[in-house]
Image (cartoon, rainbow, N blue to C red):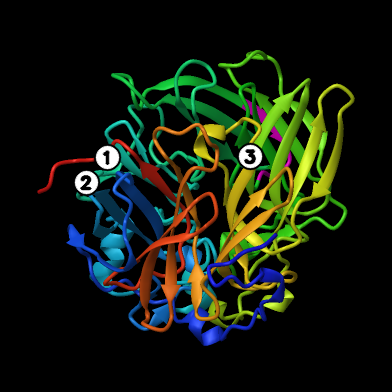
């Protein structure tokens, strides 16, 4: 059964949207606000919702009249929405990276972007400039007393969790070398081994790739301290954005991708534009034993993966030496060519992501797969307390239409056991970002809590915050933000971040 906020089954929706409505979200964030009380225009904010919703994404997409080639090259802007006593307050600030400060002063791009943004002057001006611009725009998480703005090709930037003031690059209490790559997609173990922890990784790529798997304490006096650390080297070039965890394993899917650096060296393309799928390549699952688990110290296991390309995983669990992994599979690596305008993309020509389950049998080294949902989706998550365990429910952003690619306009709750669906839709003129499921602090039901999501409201050219019940996606509150925030990337929730008013 499918339900939407308008009581219209998703299967009967038209899927129509205006591209200019979707593209209108791509703009510079023009204001930085501090503790701005937000206006509730419908419903009421649940008083039980106590904590802070952090969200990161590109906030500067144009400088001196030049647009980024891809929104992923935009400078990171953190939005923080604090909930207390049925009210919400917004603080937002750009991450003051070294490159942001320099380019803000110059009012032009002086660094190349990984996804194709070039300095003015053509290929000659860009050739052999191999500097990486840490744009800190992909994720934001709280670890100990630090709020970390993450970008996976370099070290995190440390921020004040309340004011969002930028302190500077973080070594995570000495765990990282200067500029060391650190994933923008950590996973939070809810306590499989006695205490919760953050599990993350860094990658050093080349003909052989080395994964550094790290685990950090998240509670108590040692919060933020590195407690487990191992390195493993694999054959082939690694393109890894996400991974999954179980109590015993860290699970990576190495896509069948090759990297030709020559166009990047010659100033013709960004580094990410030099990636392409191997026509005869074979993706691999790399399973690394966690040092906190039963197979600590053992070598990794390697299994062949199904065809396709994966950015994000939903969740993983294990039973009887079989790992269940749910991921969003694309038929091919989606990219934007050097002569394309990202605001004018043809969704019909880009492969859609579809939720797929893989069963990895470690005894006989076989892998089988099953399509869970045909609908185009992204940004899927389970209840955080079910991270690494068998989960019945998931929440995700989807296209409005049932099949084929399209912009993300709806939020779907999917019962992974019965395939029952609940849908909240922002169509035709609204566009959703990553939904965040926040469980109630005292609850035994897996789907009891809220889903919060930022929605681009093209009718008023600004952003709305939607709060809905996570059990049936019934809308509980619509909150207007006084700023326009472009389509973004990842966010997180902090229950404990209830700091006194300034």
Magenta segment includes 237:
yes
In this picture, is 98 found above or below 20?
above
Q: How many marks?
A: 3
Cβ–Cβ below 8 Å for labels 1 and 3? no
Distance between the Cα atoms at labels 3 and 2? 30 Å
Bounds of the magenta segment: 232-238
Quadrant of the rendering where the N terminus is positioned? bottom right
Out of 214 and 193, give the one closest to the viewer.
Answer: 193
Is residue 135 among the parts visible in the rendering?
no
Question: Residue 286's image quarter?
Answer: top right
Question: Which residue is labeled 2 in the image?
Answer: 162
Mark 1 against mark 2, which lies toward the viewer? 1
The label number, if any, that marks residue 315 in the structure image: 3
Magenta segment includes 178:
no
Question: Residue 105's image quarter?
Answer: bottom left
Q: Is residue 322 left or right of residue 207?
A: right
Q: Is residue 244 left or right of residue 108?
A: right
Residue drawn 49% across the image and 55% down it: 435
Q: Is residue 474 left or right of residue 250?
A: left
Question: Residue 51's image quarter?
Answer: top left
From the top left corner, tell me how far across and down residue 97 is, in percent. 31, 54
Q: Around disc 3, counting alpha carbons within 10 Å, would you say few (fewer than 14), some (14 to 19), or many (20 or more)?
A: many
Question: Which residue is labeled 1 in the image?
Answer: 497
From the top left corner, tell me how far across and down residue 172 is, in percent. 36, 31
Q: Is residue 237 left or right of residue 20?
A: right
């Amino acid at each position: 059964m499918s339900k939407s906020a308008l009581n219209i089954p998703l299967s009967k929706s038209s899927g129509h949207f205006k591209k200019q409505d979707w593209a209108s979200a791509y703009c510079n964030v023009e204001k930085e606000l501090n503790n701005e009380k937000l206006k509730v225009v419908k419903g009421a904010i649940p008083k039980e919702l106590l904590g802070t919703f952090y969200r990161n994404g590109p906030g500067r997409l144009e400088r001196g009249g030049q647009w980024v080639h891809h929104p992923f090259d935009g400078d990171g802007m953190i939005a923080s929405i604090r909930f207390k006593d049925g009210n919400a307050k917004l603080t937002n600030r750009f991450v003051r990276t070294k490159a942001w400060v320099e380019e803000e002063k110059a009012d032009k791009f002086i660094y190349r972007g990984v996804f194709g943004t070039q300095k003015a002057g053509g290929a000659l001006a860009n050739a052999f400039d191999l500097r990486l611009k840490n744009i800190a725009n992909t994720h934001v998480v709280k670890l100990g007393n630090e709020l970390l703005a993450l970008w996976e090709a370099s070290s995190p930037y440390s921020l004040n969790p309340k004011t969002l003031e930028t302190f500077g690059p973080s070594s995570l209490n000495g765990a990282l070398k200067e500029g060391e790559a650190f994933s923008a997609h950590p996973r939070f173990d809810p306590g499989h081994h006695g205490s919760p922890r953050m599990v993350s990784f860094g990658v050093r790529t080349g003909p052989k790739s080395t994964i550094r798997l790290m685990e950090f304490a998240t509670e108590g006096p040692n919060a933020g301290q590195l407690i487990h650390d191992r390195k493993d080297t694999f054959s082939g070039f690694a393109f890894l954005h996400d991974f999954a965890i179980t109590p015993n394993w860290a699970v990576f899917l190495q896509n069948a991708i090759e990297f030709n650096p020559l166009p990047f060296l010659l100033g013709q393309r960004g580094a990410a534009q030099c990636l392409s799928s191997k026509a005869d390549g074979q993706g691999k699952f790399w399973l690394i034993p966690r040092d906190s688990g039963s197979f600590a110290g053992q070598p990794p296991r390697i299994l062949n993966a199904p065809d396709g390309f994966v950015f994000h995983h939903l969740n993983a669990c294990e039973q009887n030496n079989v790992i269940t992994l749910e991921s969003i599979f694309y038929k091919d690596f989606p990219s934007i060519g050097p002569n394309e305008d990202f605001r004018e993309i043809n969704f019909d020509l880009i492969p859609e992501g579809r939720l797929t389950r893989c069963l990895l049998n470690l005894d006989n080294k076989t892998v089988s797969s099953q399509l869970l949902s045909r609908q185009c989706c992204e940004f899927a998550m389970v209840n955080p307390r079910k991270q690494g365990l068998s989960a019945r429910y998931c929440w995700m952003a989807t296209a409005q239409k049932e099949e084929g690619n399209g912009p993300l306009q709806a939020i779907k709750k999917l019962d992974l056991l019965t395939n029952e669906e609940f849908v909240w839709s922002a169509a035709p003129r609204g566009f959703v970002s990553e939904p965040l499921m926040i469980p109630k602090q005292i609850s035994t039901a897996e789907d009891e809590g809220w889903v919060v999501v930022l929605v681009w409201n093209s009718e008023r050219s600004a952003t709305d915050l939607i709060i809905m019940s996570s059990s049936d996606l019934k809308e509980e509150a619509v909150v207007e933000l006084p700023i326009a925030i472009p389509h973004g990337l990842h966010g997180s929730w902090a229950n404990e971040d209830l700091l006194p008013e300034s």
